[in-house]
Image (cartoon, coloured by chain):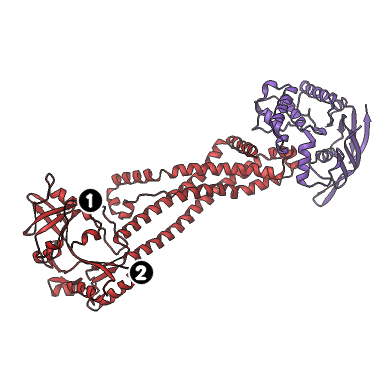
Chain colours: A purple, B red
Amino acid sequence: MTLALRVENLHKDYVLKGETVRALRGVTFQVELGEYIAVMGPSGSGKSTLLNLLGCLDRPTAGSYYLGGRDVARLNDNSLSDVRAANIGFVFQSYNLIPQLTVVENIEVPLYYQGRLNAANRRRCRELACLVGLRDRLHHRPTELSGGQQQRVAIARSLANDPYFILADEPTGNLDTATSEEVLELFEKLNKQGKTIVLVTHENDVAARCKRVLRLRDGLVESDVLH
Amino acid sequence: MIRSVFITLRLAIYSLLLHKLRTGLAVVGILIGIMAVIWLVAMGQGVSYQAQKQIEDLGARNIIVRSVKPSDQGSSAASRSFFLEYGLLREDYQRIVTNIPAGVIEQAVPIREMRKEFRRDAYTVEGRLVGCPPEYYSLNNLRMESGRFLEDRDGEPPDNVCVLAATTAAKLFPLEDPIGKNIQIDRDFYVVIGQTAERDPTAAIGGSLDSQDYNLDVYIPLQTLRWRIGDMVFTSRSGSREGEIVQLSQITLTIADKDQVYETAGIIRSLLDKYHPRQDFGVVVPQELLRQAKLIEMMFNILLVIIAGISLVVGGIGIMNIMLATVTERTREIGIRRALGAKRRAIIQQFLAESVVLTGVGGLLGVGCGFLVGPVVRSVRDVAQQVFPDMMSALPSVIMELQPRIAWWSIAASLFISIGVGVLFGIYPALRAAYMDPIEALRHE
């Protein structure tokens, strides 16, 4: 099997008011293509730090991060932006759509920043919107949509650049039970189609639906269980 | 490339339209600045054009020697003699013509002018009586409406003939053709031989020359004036009668070579100084006035640039303020865009596009309002004339007759400057947006 990502002995230190906080103290794991993995852990476990590193929003203090076989741990800001645009699909807790853009335009954003916004790709973005069930909402703005619909737009957006993996940060945190269920079903459907999903959550019942659960505690991997 | 520019601009416009009032006010700030540039430049150009045209009317190659009533003469001399005798003499004319080497002076035109009442039947009009040689015609760019101007034969021997200016003719002969008819000046009658066309009056230039309205003139041969009226003029002023003896009011010299004008003016000055210890004459060199006018124009323009610069800086600070507010407000959006792969450069582009669209639109609207300068100046003047007629008549003619002239370079410069202001005052907010930590930005509420 091919690897989507691999982290090796990942360290991250923060300096807060002169004191060094060791958020990650050597995390090692790998995710193969097609996996559906939940990252769990109480607050202070280093969960958010790991999320930022996996999302290439930050750089580790030490260790390596291979994304599709390429070490991205030491890249500069510009190259990290390229990696985010090309290889990672973000889904956030609070949807994070751009309010002045329509549904389709929001889905197009990652492609725009890659400079790959051509007619064929635009058509694909419309198809993605249809895939997540927003066929009749293509030209609505985010404020005209419900929370569940907005999150589905965000999921479509995370697929636009055909990333190595979808990085979802508490995707159901702002949704009611029924809508959460819809979103999770969508993730499962996508995973069946071969999409790799890394889902960061603190909800056990959400994590329980994943094939694999990685638990963090005090900046280290506590357990890595395959269902 | 073009596509992404289009997308960037469209996004900028969308984002700006989210806050219509705020955007509108920022645009107005720039609009006023740009409008101020265009208006001020247009008015400056109008004033200097007017001044330069008048000076050019006087002739760049001319030297004007005028009689000046001595001011330091005081009451002692006036009490000694009933008549005040001053000014240029016919001898002075001879002195100038004989002492300046031949070929330097192209022509020398002496004139004698005075206020007189002209009469014809029941019609009277007060105007300027000018005794002049035929050359006066070309010197002052007069044109004939009908008949002919004075010729040499009218003065030798001196005939009682006259040429009327347009307004004089209209007032004395409201219904008839004046040619061949008589008008009366003092006790004498003069045959009208011609009528000049209407001519734009010249405004006063600095303190050196009074304004001249050529339309209320009557021209007669210089010799006729000397024989019929003489050098002595009585004027009644507030009950008491005064007398003046002046031989010539003005001698206008046209110099053949433009480069010799200054030198010749100096020679004439020192030549006449010997005979006029009372300084009862003045030498005006239009070329010098022209140079002064250009200098004043330059200083005026520098002043305008400073004023316009200040107003644009004020507008620019407004833009910066708005952009900083926008950046803070849209921290979250910046975080999202960075997470989705936007490079710092893309964020800078996005916010610069917004500030440039703001100032560009402000600039375009400002240019549009700039074109209103003519009608606005005219209507303000008309309204002011009706509301404060006294105050308005006290204003110098430069302001009364000001015609703003929009300078095309000021429009091009304005558009360029407005975009420059957008970049200059937008770059700091854009950099601030681009250098936000994406993680912090995403967490921002």
Residue B404 position, x and y percent, is 38, 49
The chain that hosts pointer 1 is B
Callouts 2 and 1 close, C-beta under 8 Å? no
Q: What residue type is labelled 1?
A: Glu
Position of residue B381 in the picture relative to residue A125 (left or right): left
Q: What element carries label 2?
A: helix
Quarter of the image that includes the N terminus of chain B: top right
- Give me the residue at 43% from left, 52% from top: B41
Asked whether, in this view, residue B319 is left or right of residue A105, the answer is: left
Judge from the rendering whether residue B131 lies leftward or rightward of residue B257; answer left or right.
Answer: left
Amino acid identity at mark 2: Asp
Mark seen at residue B82: none
Q: Which residue is drawn at 13% across and 68% down?
A: B231
Q: Residue A171 location in percent, x, y?
A: 78, 29
Q: Mark 2 points at which residue?
A: B259
Q: Can residue B444 be seen in this view?
A: no
Residue depth check, mark 2 versus mark 1: number of the one nearer the observer: 2
- Residue B198 marker: 1
Q: In this view, does A29 lie above or below B313?
A: above
Instruction: Say whether mark 1 and mark 2 are on the same chain.
Output: yes
Does residue B419 lie above or below A158 as drawn?
A: below
- Measured from the top left, where is residue A55 in percent x and y? 80, 38
